[in-house]
Amino acid sequence: MDILLTGSVAYDYLMTFPGLFKDQFLPERLEKISLSFLVDSMSRQRGGVAPNIAFTMALLGERPRVMATVGEDFGEYRQVLEAAGIDTTLMQVVPGLFTASFFATTDQVNAQLASFYPGAMKVASKQSILNVQPRPDLVIVSPNSPDAMSKFACECYDANIPYLYDPSQQILRLEGSELARDMEGAYFLFVNDYEFELITRKTGWDLEQMLQNIKVVVVTRGKDGATVYSGEKEQFIPAVTEERIVDPTGVGDAFRGGFLVGYAHGFDWKLCGEIGSLAAVYCLEQKGPQNHSYTLPEFVKRFRVHFDDGGKLNELINPKEKS
């Protein structure tokens, strides 16, 4: 299956705060908030939603394509992605601009405050799904320049190309009418539980109305697992117990990558979600969204400690083998 990912490509500047954000806010003074957090550490990581998802997909044997606009500082990043097995042909360098940058500070309970500088991403709408050859089987419309997200969703809808809508960080920038327009006709909607509530509030759509317009809705809930809704069916996906918690950045993207690999193999929603659940934990156990690694046999072995795949994951190790 040919899966095309659109979305942000960024350098992530990740910092850790030794306290709790919630202890620093004065509820009666929120309108005059002015805070500076002294952090203990900082690292620069390769990130962005589209390559984060693609990275996990590549680890699990796929070769996804990423379409995005990037800056003149992207050369080394491109080499890393290609070496990982990701097709970067459609990642276009924009002269005179830097690649987008994500600045995130995480506290001791993994609460996170972040800012995002779009850089080259702000001209992503100059690209077009309709120009992509060969035609993709599924397009991922993930956080990007808002006009690009709307354009890509519209192009997929008009061209009858199935797409996954993942507005996440851009929900705050999008109006309810824009969210409803781009959800309508999507094959998948992926959100976390907080984002689900935001969308409900902005659009007035409850889960029932979402499922009248979207085939599959996936809501992730961190340590409380995830739920896959399809028609009248509801499938709970438990979280995998981590060996250690290092960094939550990119965990949701890894879940999406694992889920999409299951989808590409034609697995049922339960198994897709379980693959996503384990892929997410591998990311959680490392610093940054693209520093986890495993072989396919290692992944399958750990998977079977937690879930019963009925032998289906043999197909990941040997794609010619059908269980």
Image (cartoon, rainbow, N blue to C red):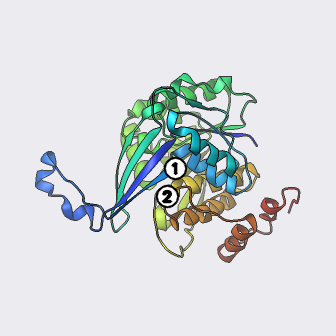
**Which quarter of the figure is the N terminus placed in?**
top right
Q: Are the residues tagged 2 and 1 within 8 Å (C-beta)?
A: yes
Q: Position of residue 129 (x, y in %)?
A: 63, 27
Q: Residues within 10 Å of mark 2 (few under 14, many from 20)?
A: many
Q: Position of residue 81 (x, y in %)?
A: 63, 47
In the foreground, 103 or 273: 103
Secondary structure under tag 2 reads loop
Residue topped by disc 1: 46
Q: Residue at x 52, y 41 (%)?
A: 9
Secondary structure under tag 1 reads strand
Q: Amino acid at mark 2?
A: Gly
Q: Which mark is drawn over residue 297?
A: none
Residue topped by disc 2: 288
Say if residue 71 shows up in the picture.
no
96 in relation to 232, above or below: above
Q: Earlier in the sequence, mark 2 or mark 1?
A: 1
Q: Residue at x 49, y 63 (%)?
A: 287
Q: Position of residue 205 (x, y in %)?
A: 44, 41
Q: Amino acid at mark 1?
A: Arg
79 in relation to 312, above or below: above
Q: Residue at x 70, y 48 (%)?
A: 85
**Which quarter of the figure is the C terminus placed in?**
bottom right
**Mark-to-mark CA distance, 2 and 1:** 8 Å
94 in relation to 83, above or below: above
Q: Residue at x 67, y 45 (%)?
A: 82
Say if residue 19 shows up in the picture.
yes
Q: Quadrant of residue 239?
A: bottom right
Q: Residues within 10 Å of mark 1 (few under 14, many from 20)?
A: many
